[in-house]
Image (cartoon, coloured by chain):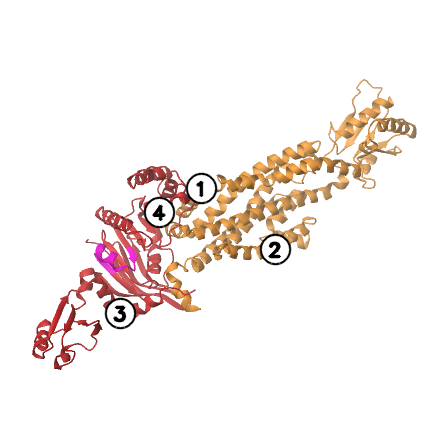
Chain colours: A orange, B red
Amino acid sequence: MSRMLRGAFVIGRRDFSATVLSKTFLFFLLGPLFPLMFGGIFGGIGASVASQREKPVVAVVASQSDFDTLSAARERLADAIDDEKLIGLVRFAPEPDAAAQQKRLLETSDPPIHAVLTGIPAHPKLTGAIHFDGTTARQLQLMLADAGVTPTQDSRLAVTPTATTSGSLSKDRAITGQIGQTVLFFLTLLLSTMLLSQLVEEKSNKIVEVVAAAVPIESLFVGKLFAMLAASVLGLLVWTAAGAAVIASLKQGGLGALPTPAMGWPGFLMLTVAYFAMNYLLLGAVFLTIGAQASTVREVQTLSMPVTFAQVVIFGFAATSAVSPNSGVGLAAAIFPLSSPLAMVARAAQQPDLWPHVAAILWQMLWVALILWLGAKLFRKTVLKSGPGLRWWRLGRT
Amino acid sequence: MTGAPAVEAVDLVKDFGETRAVDGVSLSVPVGSIYGLLGPNGAGKTTTLRMLLGIIDPSSGTRNVLGHGRPIDAAAEVGYLPEERGLYPAMHARDAIAFMGALRGLSLREGRRRADELLKEHGLGDWAKKPIRNLSKGMAQTVQLLGTIIHKPRLIVLDEPFSGLDAINQARLEERIRGEARNGATVIFSTHVIAHAERLCERIAIIAKGKVAFEGRVDEARSRLRPIVRLRTRASHGPWRSVIPADAREEGDHLVFELPASGPEPLLKALIDGGAGIEALSIERPGLHDAFVAIAGESAAEAMVEKEPEP
């Protein structure tokens, strides 16, 4: 075992440095950044278009006269600023149970309420999925000041940010899960394709013969797999940092603007990384096994087509289950080893329990080991026998 | 040359599907010797070496490498140069050598240090930090050979090491092999060129069609063969023809045949008494080539014909 790991380390170390120091890796790193950068530029336009559609609506719980004053202030502001850029105001008559009303309003989806303004004119208080310093609060503050409804010494609007409005919470969490799945899927697709072509390069270099004589074949597989994982984690870090920067610059409130997953952000991110690793290891092991059978780039292209297709099917399977992790499909996707990491990421976004993740990761590790073992066996059987000295034999068979 | 052999194989068999590539090969390679695996392409040499190295497992039979039943356990003390050379094209020469050492358990730092030394020794000092793809084919082969011996292995296995080398580099490699053997290493190499085996080896195994046709000392192989008679006579027919073996062949105006078991005297007497009129006569000790043809026989000849794959 220790020899296997030592061999894997030697191979992994070479692969990692060869990958990371190559020019291709720079493109690999920069590749996703280009769409992000363009996304940043065009997203600026897109964001304003989107905000037109999704103009934040604030529910104002006040008497008709108080609302009219505020509404008039909004109109005056609209003369100065484009109406489309202003928040919308909807009046609701105060009810005896203010807290219940507020809760109910935040849960309403028609119209979708982003925040609830209460207590005007004396103690204006804003509650909702908004940022303390965000546009909504600031606009409202301007309107309130203009309407002269801030007689208290504290001219600032009291803002109570909630994580998200509860009405849209579960849906938003499913979205977080799906975003997680999509990111995982594309990353893995990209990486496993790279892994495949690397293995073929190895074989066409004939270096594999030297390696196979020196270390167990399992070392070759494990070393390659983990080197690529390390390289991709490096890439992931760069992308995440860049992505967070772009999101932070685009969306007010930065990452906080995304719906918080059920596990909480730290737990969710940690699990995402873990499932990324598992998803990659699982598919990478499959790709290695398949790639080991191919001997030319053309064969790899022929092979990777159905494999990519199968991946899309698995992705679709996992994505279907994302909305309802506890349904039959959801459980099946979580148990089937190849879709398990994707399905479990979606679960992490929606359900707070930790133990299913521990079980799932152990289950997935078992499969990684199993596929690797099988791959190494197949590799030894089918590839290494077809050495140059045996062409006469292969000829004799046809 | 006493004690346990460096490498021993007993009845190695390897089946690939329905085809038997190696059919009961047994070898014994003494420690510190240069051992040649001789045979036509496709005879099963590479498969035998791969089994000895543990790259593939035999279908049946046992092997013992430097005292280990599983060859991979001896990996740190073995160096292997495969027939088809392979190096990472983007890797620097010294790193490639150090990497091969690292695979065999040498630390990367020590590997680089030795690589620099060895490259300098071989006049490639300036190329140590150049990528392999910039090297000529001969240089790359040297780099791979250095990578094969970087960890000072006790057993060096070279598969067709001379193929693709020019005469000068072939001579250098021969010298290198002798040097390694002088330093106590055991060298096994395969070749289909008899001259190399003849010049280098103490012992050889002649492999044809997956079987060992001969295993032993080179002079034993030679002594298996009777001296060759080349004869030119004035008369083409006569009673003297009865002493010429039936399988004698005509080469130009010469008759070529093995010296009969009875020796040269009855032959000469019959020729003279029969009035053959001897114009030229030579009786030569056979080279390894003749021994090879004689030992490997028809099967080898057939394999030689088959050796080139048809497109």
Q: Which residue is mark 1?
A: A13
Q: Is residue B190 magenta?
A: yes
Tell me which chain the residue with mark 3 is part of.
Answer: B
Q: Amino acid at mark 3?
A: Gly
**Image location of residue A360, percent across then percent down:** 58, 48
* Residue appearing at x 24%, y 59% in the figure: B204
Instruction: Please tell me which residue lies in front, A205 or A84.
Output: A205
Q: Which mark is residue A383?
A: none
Label 3, secondary structure: give it: helix
**Residue to which mark 3 is pinned:** B297
Instruction: Looking at the picture, tell me which residue is in the foreground, A300 or B137.
Output: B137
Mark 2 on the same chain as mark 1? yes
| Nearer to us: label 3 or label 2 | 3
Question: Which residue is depicted at the point 80% across and 41% down?
Answer: A109
Task: Look at label 2 and name its amino acid.
Answer: Phe
Q: CA distance from mark 3 to mark 2?
A: 55 Å
> On the rendered structure, is B79 left or right of A17?
left
Label 4: which secondary element: helix
- Residue at 59% across, 38% down: A239
Distance from disc 2 to disc 4, alpha carbons, whole Å, reads: 40 Å
How much space separates mark 1 and mark 3, taking CA atoms?
50 Å
Tell whether A136 sits left or right of A354. right
Residue A304 % position (x, y): 56, 55
Q: Which mark is residue B144?
A: 4
In which chain is the residue bearing label 1? A
Tell me the magenta residue range: B189-204
Q: Which residue is mark 2?
A: A309
Spatial CA distance of label 1 from label 4 is 20 Å
Number of the front mark, 1 or 4: 4
Q: Chain of mark 4?
A: B
